[in-house]
Amino acid sequence: MNSMRKHTRVPEFTPEGDLVQPESPFSLPYDMRDQVKWIDFSCPCNPLGTPQAIVDIMAHSLSERQFGYRPDFESYSLRTALSHYHEISPNGILVGVTPSQMIRCAAQAFQPATVGISAPCPMEYHLAITNAGHEVVSFQNKRTFATCDVATLRKNGETFDAAVLANPSFPTSRLIDKGMLREYLEAFSWVIVDESYIELSLAGESYIPLTQRYENLIVVRNPSMTFALPGMPMAYLVAHPHTIEHIKRFYDGSGVSMVGELLAQELMGALPYLEETSELLETEIPWLQCMLSLIPGVHIFPAEANYVLCSFEEDADLDLGVANARELVDRLQVAGYTVPLMSNVIGLDEGRYFCVCAKKRQENQALINVMRDIILGR
């Protein structure tokens, strides 16, 4: 049988080095990335980038060959630093690698149950809960994508024993009200709340303090996103010390790395960096929402964190340059802007939605200009 190899069209450039927009979209192969100045809007990490102090600590540790030692699986240094940061006991903290790993290790400590997961959500939530031996039930508010309150769940006939929520949710960028969370904690045997992006939200309130009152609450955090270290995954969960002791019976901690011990050295010194982050996002998140909403065919959903969920619908009254979200994402990729299509998200129609992560104003403005030109066929 003859095999056919699919050829990928190579982008064309002007004599000045500018990219020539193609008549139809295509996907840029990975080996072409060095020919385009990529601006990544696909990762919702801190737009300020990694703090220089952390970069310096890592460089020093590499030069001193500190990574040649095995990490402390108990993560004493990081748990101690985090206990000061959150003003809780270090016995209420468990360190790991990724949020999905933390969700799974918490869930596997409980008897098999039916677990409700608020959608839209990453597929990793479902995999983590399923791999922990539980049955998954999805629920969602299809009109606003905000998390349903307990009364609405009861009205809709939703029944489950435990729940997985996010504060803020990804990719819908919605925060959870404290009163609603308390209802969940009183209604279900255990509740996991993913707060991976809470420090990259608009004045979002962390519910870590509630773990001291509710032993059935587990909060997951993701400092890799907070400190713009997506290539060095690191996560931890916070719960009542009694709950942590129970979870540790099923968790060996062997996945932790030296990165957490390095972060522990700079965690408290990073407060000015986090304040600067909040000031930037207070300006850029509303601005990005507004500018995206002004582009023909683009519909946005209210954002309370550093990423904006959008959908694209072709306007029958306008002759637009793209027909759907997938084509728009492909054209943006060719132009050097990576924007993710929400094709692997539970609760969203595949091919209709994309998500734009907030960066600094100059980069945000550049994306808006290119997106507008592509959609208007310029």
Image (cartoon, grey):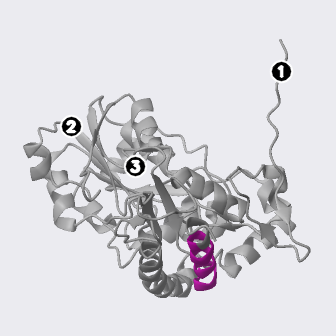
- Kindly identify which residue carries mark 2: 161
Task: Identify the main secondary structure in magenta.
Answer: helix
Q: Residue at x 45, y 31 (%)?
A: 131
> Which structural element holds mark 3?
strand
Asked if the residues shown at circle 1 and circle 2 are in contact, with their CB atoms under 8 angstroms apart, the answer is no
The structure residue drawn at horizontal position 64% and vertical position 65%, both measured from the top left corner, is: 229
Q: Which residue is the site of mark 1?
A: 3
Q: Amino acid at mark 3?
A: Cys
Q: Position of residue 358 (x, y in %)?
A: 53, 73
Q: Which residue is mark 3?
A: 121
Does residue 46 appear in the picture of this structure?
Answer: no
What is the CA distance from the residue labelled 3 to the residue labelled 1? Answer: 39 Å
Q: For residue 369: magenta?
A: yes
Find residue 296 and report its image quarter.
Answer: bottom left
Q: Image point 65% across, 59% down: which residue?
A: 331
The x and y percentages for residue 265 are: 63, 74
In the rendered image, residue 190 lying in the magenta stretch gets the answer no
The nearer-to-camera label among 3 and 1 is 1
Nearest to viewer (mark 1 / mark 2): 1
Disc 2 crowd, CA 10 A, few/some/many (<14, 14-19, 20+): some
Please report the bounds of the magenta region as a residue range: 360-372
- The numbered mark, 2 or 3, whose residue comes first in the sequence reads 3
- The CA span between labels 2 and 3 is 19 Å
